[in-house]
Image (cartoon, rainbow, N blue to C red):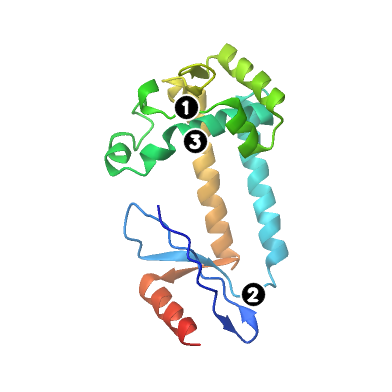
Amino acid sequence: MARRSHRPAPQTGGKEIQVPRRRATTITPEGRLVLAESAANSRLFIFMIGNFLHRIERERRGLYGGDLDLALVAEMIGTAAIEPGMRDAAFREQHGTFESVVGVEGQRAVNATSIASASGIPRETVRRKLKRLLELGVIVEKGRARYVIKPGVVQRPEQQAAFARGIQQTVLFMNECLEHGVIRWVPAKDGKARSAAARKK
């Protein structure tokens, strides 16, 4: 995992330039998306983000009976379960698609306290949601009071359909941001040149 840089951001014209933090990537990118250098479209950006989140939350509600807290607890378990593996090239190659089932032993378990701390949901509420997810067959215990996603759950047709729609909505949102000038594409060479120029200033 890339380390956070503590180098102060360069300034130009009295305004701070936010330099994106470098992150570990699976491929060498040809460039990256950056925010447009203007605050004039900030309202538009927030409006578009709001619409995007509403569309995504509709899918989450559909999968979990309208209970977004239940959805969040399940999603946090699923994310935490594979987070260590996704940093490993061999794991990503083996489980890069949903066709591959990640078994219990391949997942990192989490407990109610960790979920409550990360989500802001009260611990007793988290425990009730965990009990409900166990009843629904979404999660299983891996050790006492430590939970992972039940193998095969993400391969369920309704899950796959929701994931596909979510991916489509995300790509649509990204393209809308480009089309409205909220973000722009910066080729890798151009981005390096801009960073070097900013450092000289």
Q: Which residue has dot 3 on it? A: 79
Q: Which residue has dot 1 on it? A: 109
Asked whether residue 103 appears in the rendered view, the answer is: no
User: Is 132 placed left or right of 137 in the picture?
Assistant: right
Q: Helix or strand or loop: what does disc 2 sit on?
A: loop
Q: Please identify the quarter of the rendering in which residue 107 is found.
A: top left
Dot 1 surroundings within 10 Å: few (below 14), some, or many (20 or more)? many
| N-term mark: 1 or 2 | 2
Q: Which one is nearer the viewer's eye here, 163 or 125?
A: 125
Dot 2 surroundings within 10 Å: few (below 14), some, or many (20 or more)? few
Q: Which one is nearer the viewer's eye here, 120 or 198?
A: 120
Foreground tag (1 vs 2): 1
| N-term mark: 1 or 3 | 3
Q: Helix or strand or loop: what does disc 3 sit on?
A: helix
Coordinates of residue 115 in the picture (x, y in percent): 60, 32
Q: Which residue has dot 2 on it? A: 38
Foreground tag (3 vs 2): 3
User: Is the residue 19 above or below the residue 110 in the image?
Assistant: below
Q: Amino acid at mark 2?
A: Ser
